[in-house]
Amino acid sequence: MNSRFTEEFDGLVEKFSELVTGDASPEMVEKIKVWSIYNHIHKTMPALTSHWNQLHPEGKAEIRKLFEEVRSLHLKLKDENQKQE
């Protein structure tokens, strides 16, 4: 891929991370990438994620933990934004 595109796309993911969680740190951006990809796979091919979850129970637990973290951060950010209005 073109390096300019890669930089621009990385910027998009960073902004997405910030808007969803309030955090655009490199660690959170990586978490959002995993969260987004898993979420997409789960919605488009649920049987695949179900199969993967059965084969990798520790991975399933990590994904669950990640989903809960993202949800918690998003709700916190949403609450803070509503208080500012």
Image: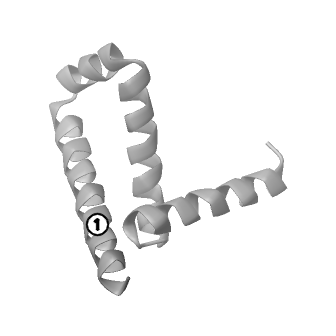
Residue 31's spot in the image, x, y percent?
39, 55
- In-front residue for pair 24/57: 24
Secondary element type, mark 1? helix
Q: Quadrant of the C terminus?
A: bottom left
Residue at x 22%, y 29% (from the top left corner): 56
Residue at x 24%, y 38% (from the top left corner): 59
What colour-coding does the image apply? one colour
Residue 21's spot in the image, x, y percent?
38, 66
- In-front residue for pair 84/3: 84
Q: Is residue 65 left or right of residue 16?
A: left
Residue at x 20%, y 51% (from the top left corner): 65
Q: Is residue 11 left or right of residue 8?
A: left
Q: Is 12 drawn above or below residue 83 in the view shown?
A: above
Question: How many numbered markers are drawn?
Answer: 1
Residue at x 31%, y 14% (from the top left corner): 47
Residue 4: image quadrant is bottom right
Residue 57: image quadrant is top left
Residue 8: image quadrant is bottom right
Q: Quadrant of the N terminus?
A: top right
According to the picture, the residue beneath numbered tag 1 turns out to be: 73
Within-10-Å neighbours for mark 1: few <14, some 14–19, many 20+: some
Three-letter code, disc 1: Leu
What residue occupies the far bottom of the structure in this picture?
84
Q: Is 23 drawn above or below residue 9 in the view shown?
A: below
Residue 76's spot in the image, x, y percent?
26, 71
Residue 83's spot in the image, x, y percent?
29, 82
Q: Is 1 drawn above or below residue 52 in the view shown?
A: below
